[in-house]
Amino acid sequence: MSKTNDILLAAKARAEQSSLPYSGALTPDEAYELLQTVPGAKLVDVRSSAEWNFVGTVPGAVNIEWKRFPGMIDNPDFLSQLKQQVSAESLIMFLCRTGGRSDQAARLAAANGFTDCFNVLEGFEGDKDGEQHRGTVSGWKARKLPWIQS
């Protein structure tokens, strides 16, 4: 089997184990590998505009706020924005700070006709370290995957 198939099988097994209503759960490394190998795969960053501007972004990601800044209120246009920017048939990986908002986005997308939805576990910044800082223990940044700062 190919590395891509192995990743997809592992992600699906995680989803089944946790009774997730979407295709799978990926580690940041797995998500990055799929971005490189699956034609048309999309990473959808659902963090707020403040997080993109002050914490950093993944080059090439589709940015759609799950909760709008300021106030962190629900984005009522999330689904319509997703439909405008990403094909429902694409392999879509949702990313947020630690994996919570992206789980919610994957659930919503899967319930609305997006057929290949994945949550990126650990998110962009991951868990806090002993000094209460994110981005050093787990997540996209800690794994030294590509990202840029505004």
Image (cartoon, helix red, strand yellow):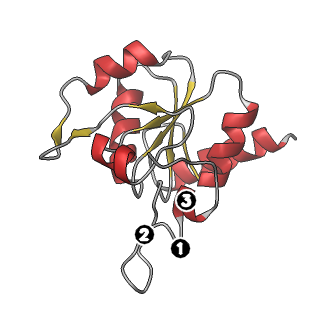
Give the percent coordinates (x, y) of residue 62. Answer: 46, 29
Task: Give the left or right position of residue 97, taking residue 136 as reference.
Answer: left
The quadrant the C terminus occupies is top left
The quadrant the N terminus occupies is top right
Circle 1 SS class:
loop
Circle 3 SS class:
helix
- CA gap, disc 2 to disc 3? 9 Å
Give the percent coordinates (x, y) of residue 18. Answer: 47, 55
Give the percent coordinates (x, y) of residue 125. Answer: 45, 60
Which quarter of the picture shows residue 34?
Answer: top right
Q: Which residue is mark 1?
A: 137
Circle 2 SS class:
loop
Q: Is residue 73 above or below residue 82?
A: below
Numbered circle sitting on residue 96: none
Classify mark 2: residues with Cα within 10 Å, few (<14), some (14-19) or many (20+): some
Q: Which residue is mark 2?
A: 134
Q: Which residue is mark 3?
A: 141
Task: Give the left or right position of residue 109, taking residue 15 as reference.
Answer: left
Task: Tell whether label 3 touches label 2 (CB within 8 Å).
Answer: no
Residue placed most toward the observer, 3 or 70: 70
Indicate the amino acid at tag 1. Val
Task: Tell whether label 3 touches label 1 (CB within 8 Å).
Answer: no
Task: Give the left or right position of residue 4, taking residue 106 as reference.
Answer: right
Residue name at image x 28 percent, y 38 percent: 66
Q: As drawn, which residue projects farthest toward the bottom? A: 130
Residue placed most toward the observer, 56 or 75: 56
Indicate the amino acid at tag 2. Arg
